[in-house]
Image (cartoon, helix red, strand yellow):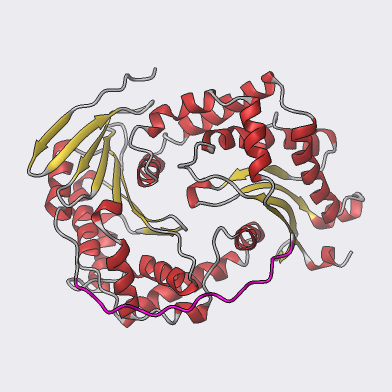
C-alpha cells in the first residue's frame, strides 16, 4: 500500500530536516547540513545491515586530461588523506565492513559500503576524513592508476563488458582516458580538480538499513558538517582534443571464450530526463521477460540465442542495449545463423517497433514489468541507498522513488514510439565473437 506523502521541517544547529515516504519501506528523512551537504536517511529495522552511498555530482568533461583527472581523483580518494595514511584508512575499511566500492560515471562519482549499526559513526568519520582532508600524494595516484588499469584488464575477459565499453566510446557516452593521460595527473592537478568539483552542495549521502535515526543525525552532523578545503591553486593548462575520425557503425570486439554476442547499442536519456520513464517501459517491452518481443521472436519462434534481452544502463549514464548471446561453436555446427544474421534480427526488432506498434495489452504488460522491477530494486538496502543517492544527486529529489511507479504507469504507446524514434537515430552495432567465427 502506498504511503501518503507528507513533509515536516525542523531547524536547529544550522541543519534543515525534511521527511518524505517511499512507496515501500519507512519514511526517508533528508538533512541539509549547514555547509550545504545533503544526507538522506531511511531506517529499516528489518534489515541486518546498513548501506551507505556517497554521490558527488560532477560535470561532463570534454577535455581528455580533465576526464583523466576526474577518474584518478575518484580512485585516489580511498588511499589516505593529510590526516590518515593509506594503511590506517584500509584498517578502518576492514573494521566497517571491508570494502568501499568506487564508481565513476560521466555525471557522478559514487562511494558505497555495507556495514552494521555499531560502525555507522566510524563510516561517517571515514567519509568526513576523505572529503575534508583529501590529499593526493604520488603513492595514492599510483595506486589509483593500478586500480583503473586492473579494472580494464579484468574487463577484457568479459566480451559483453568489452562490447559495451567500445559502443559507449563510439557514441560519445564515455571516452576512457589512455594510460598516458592518466599518468599526467599530478598531485597538484588532482587537488585542483577536487577543490573545484567536490563541494558540499554537490554531495549527497544516502543511508538505508538498521540504524537509529537520531544517532545517525548526530553522527553525520559531527563528522560532515564543516567547511571544505578552499586553498587556491594556480590555473592549469589543457590541450584541446584532436579532431576524431567518425567511428564505424559496426564494431568488432574480441571474445575470449565460446560465447558470442550481437548488440545494437543506442543513445538513451539520463535519469533526470522526462523521457526516462518511457525508456523503462521500452526496455520491458523489447527485452524483459518471456513475453518481451526479443524473447518471443529469437527464442520462442526461431529457437536461437541463449540469452536475449535489453539493458538500459541509466544508472551509469550509459546507453540502451539490445543483445543476443549464443554459443558460436554449436550454432555454427547446427544452424546457418551467423553473427551478422543475428545482428540483422536485432535490427529487425527495432524496426518492427514502428511497423507493428505495441498494442495496449503489450503496453500494460511492459508498464507492469517496469514497475515491478522498480519496486524490486528497493528490496536490498544496498540498492535502496544507491538509488536514493543517485536520484537525489541527479536533482530528482528524495521522493522520486515514491512517484516513479505512477510516472511509468502514465507512459502511452505514442510517447514510447516518440522517444524511441528520437534516441534510436544514434546507434552503433557491436559483434563480440570468437576468432574462428570472425573468419566466416
Q: Residue at x 18, y 57 (%)?
A: 125
Exactly how many numbered labels are in the figure?
0
Q: Relative to 251, is 200 on the left or the right?
A: left
Q: Residue at x 23, y 71 (%)?
A: 81
Q: Is residue 156 above or below residue 423?
A: below
Q: Pinpoint residue 402: horizontal percent, then vertical percent.
A: 39, 28
Q: Relative to 426, is 383 on the left or the right?
A: left
Q: Is residue 160 something that shows in the picture?
A: yes
Q: Is residue 42 above or below residue 100?
A: above
Quadrant including the N terminus: top left
Quarter occupied by residue 107 = bottom left
Q: Relative to 242, is 61 on the left or the right?
A: left
Q: Pinpoint residue 331: horizontal percent, then vertical percent.
A: 85, 52
Q: Is residue 89 above or below residue 417?
A: below
Q: Which residues are magenta?
A: 231-248
Q: Is residue 242 magenta?
A: yes
Residue at the farthest left position: 13
Quadrant including the C terminus: bottom right
Quarter occupied by residue 275 = top right
Amino acid at each position: 500500500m502506498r504511503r501518503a506523502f507528507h513533509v515536516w521541517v525542523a531547524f536547529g544547529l544550522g541543519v534543515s530536516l525534511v521527511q518524505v515516504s517511499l512507496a515501500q519501506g519507512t519514511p526517508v528523512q533528508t538533512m541539509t547540513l549547514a555547509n550545504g551537504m545533503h544526507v538522506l536517511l531511511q531506517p529499516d529495522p528489518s534489515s541486518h545491515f546498513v548501506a551507505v552511498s556517497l554521490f558527488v555530482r560532477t560535470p561532463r568533461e570534454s577535455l581528455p586530461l580533465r576526464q583523466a583527472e576526474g577518474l584518478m581523483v575518484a580512485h585516489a580518494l580511498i588511499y589516505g588523506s593529510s590526516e590518515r595514511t593509506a594503511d590506517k584508512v584500509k584498517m578502518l575499511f576492514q573494521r566497517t565492513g571491508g570494502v568501499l566500492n568506487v564508481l565513476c560515471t560521466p555525471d557522478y562519482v559514487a562511494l558505497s559500503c555495507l556495514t552494521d549499526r555499531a560502525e555507522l559513526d566510524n563510516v561517517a568519520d571515514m567519509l568526513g576524513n576523505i572529503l575534508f582532508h583529501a590529499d593526493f600524494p604520488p603513492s595514492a595516484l599510483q595506486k589509483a592508476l593500478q586500480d583503473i588499469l586492473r579494472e580494464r584488464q579484468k574487463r577484457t575477459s568479459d566480451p559483453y563488458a568489452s562490447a559495451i565499453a567500445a559502443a559507449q566510446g563510439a557514441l560519445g557516452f564515455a571516452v576512457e582516458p589512455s594510460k598516458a593521460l592518466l599518468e599526467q595527473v599530478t598531485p597538484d592537478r588532482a587537488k585542483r580538480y577536487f577543490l573545484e568539483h567536490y563541494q558540499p552542495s554537490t554531495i549527497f549521502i544516502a543511508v538505508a538499513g538498521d540504524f537509529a535515526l537520531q544517532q545517525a543525525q548526530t553522527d553525520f552532523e559531527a563528522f560532515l558538517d564543516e567547511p571544505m578545503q578552499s586553498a587556491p591553486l594556480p590555473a592549469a593548462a589543457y590541450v584541446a582534443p584532436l579532431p576524431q575520425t567518425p567511428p564505424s557503425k559496426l564494431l568488432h570486439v574480441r571474445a575470449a571464450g565460446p560465447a558470442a554476442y550481437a548488440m545494437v547499442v543506442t543513445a538513451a536519456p539520463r535519469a533526470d530526463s522526462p523521457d526516462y520513464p518511457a525508456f523503462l517501459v521500452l526496455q520491458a517491452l523489447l527485452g524483459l521477460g518471456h513475453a518481451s518481443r526479443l524473447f518471443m521472436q529469437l527464442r520462442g519462434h526461431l529457437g536461437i540465442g541463449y540469452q536475449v534481452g535489453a539493458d538500459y544502463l541509466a544508472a551509469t549514464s550509459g546507453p540502451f542495449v539490445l543483445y543476443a548471446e549464443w554459443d558460436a561453436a554449436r550454432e555454427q555446427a547446427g544452424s546457418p545463423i551467423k553473427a551478422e544474421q543475428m545482428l540483422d534480427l536485432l535490427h529487425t526488432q527495432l524496426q518492427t517497433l514502428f511497423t507493428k506498434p505495441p498494442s495496449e495489452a503489450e503496453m500494460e504488460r511492459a508498464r507492469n514489468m517496469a514497475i515491478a522491477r522498480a519496486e524490486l530494486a528497493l528490496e536490498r538496502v544496498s540498492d535502496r541507498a544507491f538509488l536514493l543517492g543517485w536520484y537525489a544527486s541527479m536533482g530528482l529529489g528524495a521522493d522520486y522513488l515514491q512517484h516513479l511507479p505512477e510516472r511509468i504507469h502514465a507512459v502511452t504507446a505514442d510517447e514510447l514510439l516518440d522517444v524511441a524514434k528520437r534516441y534510436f537515430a544514434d546507434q552503433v552495432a557491436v559483434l563480440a565473437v570468437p576468432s574462428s567465427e570472425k573468419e566466416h
